[in-house]
Amino acid sequence: MKRKSEFFLCRVINDESGQTLIWTALMIAMLVGVGGLTVDLGRAYVSYRELQASTDAAALAAASQLPITTTNKSSNTVSSTATKYSSVSGNYNAFANLNTPVALTGAAITVTPGCVNVSGLPQCDTGLLANAVQVTQSVKIPTYFIRVLAAFGIQSAKSLTLSATATAQMRGAQRGPYNVAMALDTTQSMTKPDGGSNCSGTKIQCAEQGAQIMLSQLSPCLPGTTCGTATAGNVTNPVDEVSLFTFPPQTAGTQVGNDEGCTAKTPSEIAYPDSTAYATVSHSTPTMPPVGTATGDLTTANLQTLVNQYQVVPLSSNYRSSDNTTGTSPLTVASSGGSSTAPSIVDAVGGNSYFWGKSCTGMDAKGGESTFYAGALFVSQEYLAANARTNATNVLVLLSDGDANGGTMSAGNSNLNSNGSYPSAINQCQQAIDIATAAKAAGTKIYVVGYGVASGGCEVDTNGLTACQTLRSIASSDQNFFVDGSSTKCAGATSVTVGGVTDTLGAIFTAIVGDLTLPRLLPNTIAFTPTS
């Protein structure tokens, strides 16, 4: 009996049947645990990517409101803009995963303006208090499977705290490339003294100094490089190319000798030639007529004739010797004046006079013709379209007093519309609006600078348009519409303060170049000093 008991005990001990059930149970538990961990971590990863994306968006949006200066010390706009694009409940990127009841706590945001040292970016000093912003968001989300570890005393397993940080710089160091057409008013009113609010010279000289400011901040070539030798006005691999147009137009072929050189020569202004460039005027709708097509009534050759008369300098990039040219005379003035092989837009806008460098006579305002800027807008846009570059944005800058008041059309072979569509002697302000609308639809970004804008209406328009309304409608947006301090206050115009001065041409052109740059994200490892 004893031997049977011992045999039975040995058999039970050596029997391996049933172990599969035990291992299966253990493996199921392990698989469920790993699966649960994967689910929790996967959900956490998705939530983190949403949090980081919204933090990046908030930082870029906040950077668009910079800088903070001594004259604008409030950071409320920076903070409120960042919050608007954040994941905080009720805002643009308030993902469900990051807010209650899905999350344990809703997304929280911290916005810190500060300073970074980046090449090409205006640096913080006594006047500039913040040129960058750092945004941090955090959120606590629950776990569903790994929370079982709390039963073993790991209470932190019940939730995960996620945090994301993004640092962004203000506009100012990265731009373009752009093809820029500047159209400056050279009618009789521009020969009058400015009065000192913009500069000590005439209005055309002040306008040209504004153009100099713009040229000093655009990028002729790649960042951190020397531009090298220019051929026919353009360097190798140009970034921002700039062309100059005038209205009234000039006799074709006289611009080089009259405007591009430093000598004092009077241009040969002519009556507006737009109507004589058409064989017929068949277009009946207020849109830009197609050029060089079977249905168009303006040939490519006739368009080039208009370009030769409205354009002072073709698209060129020889206005500075390098992207980071600084000092008292940053612009490159042609040593021997302008020439047909080396056009000088710097000479045409007065040299380096704004920067106390070499001064040229620049483009003159002879007068003799009234204001009609629809033609300059049309020719500038068609020229930009014909000379488009891959990845380059077309930009048009118009400076005028805003009152299109009956510029004389050329006599002989005239094909004027009688319905107010371009080219026409009536509804001249509306023509400019219609042309600008078509240009904007084609992707051109338009900035408008009102200089000495009067309160009256457009004299030859029948729809009651005022000069202010016309200029505002031409601009791409109110953010792109400016009037100087000598102008009538125009509804919608953006007021700008730079260096403690408000709504001067210098401040306005600085703001235009600043708007052409974009805020950008920086690595969070960059040295960031919070504004005190």
Image: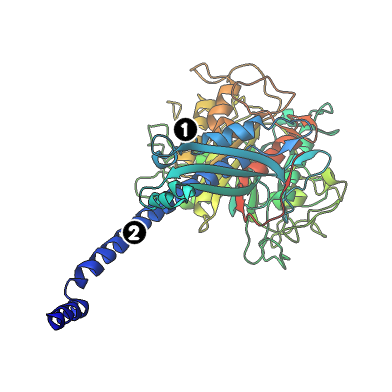
Q: Coloured how?
A: rainbow
The residue closer to the viewer here, 515 or 5, is: 5
Does the image show residue 383? no
SS of the residue at dot 2? helix
Residue 204 position (above or below residue 10): above
The residue closer to the viewer here, 74 or 46, is: 46
Callout 1 amino acid = Ser
Which quarter of the picture shows residue 23? bottom left
Q: Earlier in the sequence, mark 2 or mark 1?
A: 2
Q: Is residue 181 left or right of residue 348?
A: left
Q: Quadrant of the N terminus?
A: bottom left
The residue closer to the viewer here, 339 or 35, is: 35
Which quarter of the picture shows residue 195? top right
Q: Which residue is mark 1?
A: 89
What label sits on residue 33 in the rendered view?
2
Residue sitting at x 79%, y 45%: 350
Residue 481 position (above or below residue 459): below
SS of the residue at dot 1? loop
Query: Could you say where residue 464 lies in the image, as x and y percent from the top left?
Result: 52, 16
Query: Could you say where residue 373 lies in the image, as x and y percent from the top left?
Result: 59, 34
